[in-house]
Amino acid sequence: MSDNHHAPDDDEGHTGPIKNPRQLLLAVVFAFVIPIFVIVGIVQYVTSGDISANSELYSETAVMGRIQKVGRIELGGGSHALKSGEEVFKAQCTTCHSAGLLGAPKFGDAAAWAPRIKTGYEALLNSAIKGKNAMTPQGGGAFDMVEIGRAVVYMANAAGAKFEEPKAPAAPAAAASAVK
Ligand code: HEC
């Protein structure tokens, strides 16, 4: 008789801690979701170790370099930014001097340049800076005097002159002392 009473209790004991579908669902969720969080946590821990080890990649200058603005304006135009004679020629002078427009002496035309070269570098530079007849000042450009000088030397030398290229002002301090 006592056996008959205990039989149902024993059956319940065999089902374990999961007694209904809701508990089963919870068990499944915990069995899959918690390990995922653990794995994510481990990965984050490992990679954060990498970041501090890669100090060069994440140094302040490296990061600033990566997040700096795209455009940048440099005022004053340091001497390092001066164009070469060839660059100025290609940017400005070629318009007239390659084809001989408006009676301009052609690039590389020794016969056209010879009488002008005889007047000397200073005279040619002066014409290039202030303009001459059909040539507007600087040929219409807006260059540094050194750049215009280089362009004059570039053109004149290509037509037989042996002018020396003007040097860029060495340093602001030197320029200031020259003014005194
Ligand atoms: C708009 C056309 C034009 C452009 C651009 C131009 N030139 Fe000229 N250039 C002339 C003409 C025209 C002459 C001839 C002027 C004359 O002797 O009547 C000339 C002459 C010259 C001479 C000889 C001046 C002399 O005293 O005999 C030099 C040097 C010269 N150009 C340099 C330059 C340089 C450097 C540039 C570029 C920065 C330049 N030119 C751009 C038209 C131009």
Image (cartoon, rainbow, N blue to C red):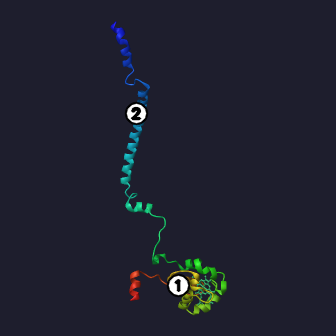
Mark sitting on residue 18: none
Task: Give the quadrant of residue 121.
Answer: bottom right
Find residue 20 and report its image quarter.
Answer: top left
The structure residue drawn at horizontal position 40% and vertical position 84%, both measured from the top left corner, is 174
Residue type of the residue flagged with mark 1: Gly
Q: Position of residue 6 (x, y in %)?
A: 35, 12
Q: What secondary structure is marked by label 2?
A: helix
Determine which residue is flagged by label 2.
30
Residue under label 1: 149
Q: Residue furthest top?
A: 1
C-beta proximity under 8 Å, tags 1 and 2 = no
Task: Name the residue rendered at 41%, 60% in the picture.
Answer: 63
Residue depicted at x 41% and y 62%: 64
Where's residue 97, x and y in %?
63, 82
Q: Residue furthest left?
A: 2
* Vertical comparison of 9 with 134: above or below: above
Secondary structure beneath label 1: helix
Quadrant holding the N terminus:
top left
Q: Quadrant of residue 109?
A: bottom right
40 vs 159, left or right, is left
Which one is nearer the viewer's eye here, 133 or 83?
Answer: 133
Which residue is nearer to you in this view: 76 or 160? 76
Q: Depth check: 36 or 109 in front? A: 36
Question: Where does the C terminus fall, quadrant-wise?
Answer: bottom left
Locate ligand 1 by image quadrant.
bottom right
Q: Where is residue 39 shown, x and y percent of the image? A: 40, 41
Q: CA distance from mark 1 to mark 2?
A: 80 Å
* Amino acid beneath label 2: Phe
Q: Position of residue 92 (x, y in %)?
A: 59, 79
In the figure, is residue 116 to the left or right of 14?
right
Tell me the residue at 55%/91% (across/down).
123
* Label 1 crowd bin: few (<14), some (14–19), many (20+), radius 10 Å: many
